[in-house]
Image (spheres, grey):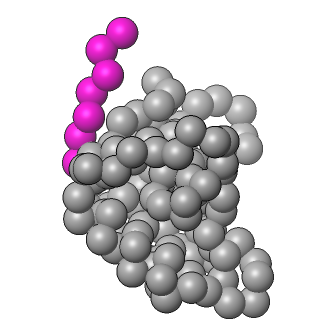
């Protein structure tokens, strides 16, 4: 299996930036913006519904951690995007144990795999 690293698409990048505007912590937002300028992504699953970030010069912690960014009110930061067939899908941005950019995850609740997220439909909740 060949692992292909790539840059975020313009639509993916816009979605991440929109999610970052809702962060409750300025420090986490600033770190994410810095990481975003120095990263590539790998599609962790065949349908591309999980994008793993590789931040240049950063080594991930060895301890497990999967943390979802939060708003000032404590609710999670997430969004919704439509797939090619019009199905709504949840979009989550996850951090590692050090609160550094780790994954963008798309969750499709309808039958079938993610086909083609239409990032022009993306909205933050």
Query: Does the magenta-highlighted stretch encompass residue 112?
Result: no
Q: Nearer the viewer, residue 59 or 38?
A: 59
Image position, residue 7 (x, y; %): 23, 48
Q: Quadrant of the C terminus?
A: bottom right
Q: Quadrant of residue 88?
A: bottom right
Image position, residue 51 (x, y; %): 44, 43
Q: Nearer the viewer, residue 117 or 49?
A: 49
Q: Nearer the viewer, residue 27 or 85?
A: 27
Point 66% across, 58% down: residue: 67
Point 68% across, 90% down: residue: 72
Image position, residue 10 (x, y; %): 25, 61
Point 49% across, 51% down: residue: 102
Picture layout, residue 32 above or below residue 108: below
17 sits to left or right of 89: left
The reply to whether residue 84 is visible in this rendering is no
Point 23% across, 40% down: residue: 6
124 sits to left or right of 9: right
108 sits to left or right of 39: right
Image position, residue 107 (x, y; %): 64, 46
Picture layout, residue 17 above or below residue 2: below
Q: Nearer the viewer, residue 103 or 105?
A: 103
Q: How many marks?
A: 0
Q: Quadrant of residue 22?
A: bottom right
Q: Quadrant of residue 1?
A: top left
**Span of residues in magenta:** 1-8
The reply to whether residue 48 is visible in this rendering is yes
Q: What main secondary structure does the magenta stretch of the protein show?
A: loop
Query: Does the magenta-highlighted stretch encompass residue 4?
Result: yes
């Amino acid at each position: 299996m060949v692992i292909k690293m790539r840059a975020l698409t313009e639509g993916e990048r816009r979605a991440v930036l929109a999610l970052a505007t809702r962060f409750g912590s300025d420090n986490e937002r600033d770190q994410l913006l810095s990481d975003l300028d120095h990263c590539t992504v790998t599609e962790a699953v065949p349908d591309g519904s999980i994008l793993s970030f590789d931040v240049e010069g950063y080594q991930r912690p060895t301890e497990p951690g999967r943390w979802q960014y939060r708003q000032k009110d404590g609710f999670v930061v997430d969004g919704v995007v439509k797939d090619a067939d019009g199905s709504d899908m949840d979009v989550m941005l996850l951090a590692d144990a050090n609160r550094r950019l780790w994954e963008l995850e798309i969750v499709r609740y309808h039958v079938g795999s993610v086909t083609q997220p239409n990032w022009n439909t993306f909205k933050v909740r």
